[in-house]
Image (cartoon, rainbow, N blue to C red):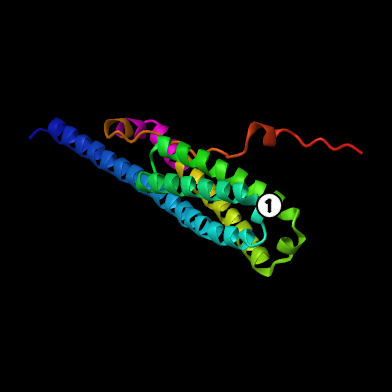
Amino acid sequence: MSITQWILLAAGLLVLFWAVGAYNRLVTLKNAIANAFGQIDVQLKRRHDLIPNLVEVARQYLVHESQTLEAVIAARNQARSAEQTAAASPLSAQALAALAGAEQTLGAALSRLMVVVEDYPELKADQNLRELSEELASTENRIGFARQAYNDQVLQFNDAASQFPTLIVARIFGLLPQAMLASTTSEAERQPVKVQF
């Protein structure tokens, strides 16, 4: 073999090793996204398990508010179903969008329940309800942190998959940028609060 052939072979091997390294890094980052979603999934399951207990405690006091309780349970079941679908394919933009919508509906139903609870002093004073409410609030915070970690992993993957020359490897193997979890706040909730005295 001539020196030119050796140089070409060495260059080819360098490109091959670089491509394998780039592919492995992208796969690692993609797996980190799935792991980050798994953390969200754990917290959502915890949240979904707390809600029936909260409703059961409230049911004892809210005899005339059965519609509100039924709405919370229906929203919880819809969110649980969407969460299971998203857990089965955590990199699916459609599954994540459906999950975000279902979680927004659940959040609204829970907010309505808490407004109703305010009208019942005995219920508001119930120790079980207070403990469940505190645990639910704590879980909501954990969900927020898990969503942030998920979006951080997606950003890291998307940056790696969009930068040249790794972008070539990403496109060849179909490792396309992933969707981030969007906020579940409505446009009205994003408006600045107006304070009037």
Horizontal and vertical percent for residue 177?
40, 34
Residue plotted at (62% across, 43% down)? 108
Residue plotted at (46% across, 57% down)? 42
Horizontal and vertical percent for residue 191?
72, 33
* Snapshot quadrant of residue 171: top left
**Magenta region's main secondary structure?**
helix
- 157 falls in the magenta region: yes
Residue plotted at (18% across, 32% down)? 8
* Snapshot quadrant of residue 5: top left
Q: Is residue 38 visible?
A: yes
Residue situated in front as seen by the camera: 167 or 39:
39
28 up-or-down from 188: above or below: below
Q: Is residue 160 visible?
A: no
108 up-or-down from 187: above or below: below
How many numbered discs sit on the rendered protein? 1
For label 1, the residue is: 114
- Label 1: how many Cα within 10 Å (few below 14, some 14–19, many 20+): some
* Snapshot quadrant of residue 157: top left
Range shown magenta? 156-169
Residue at far right of view: 197
Q: Secondary structure at mark 1?
A: helix
- 129 falls in the magenta region: no
Residue plotted at (58% across, 61% down)? 56
The N terminus: image quadrant: top left
Residue at far front of view: 64
Residue situated in front as seen by the camera: 92 or 155:
92
Residue situated in front as seen by the camera: 90 or 150:
90
Q: Amino acid at mark 1?
A: Met
Residue situated in front as seen by the camera: 9 or 177:
177
Horizontal and vertical percent for residue 31?
36, 48
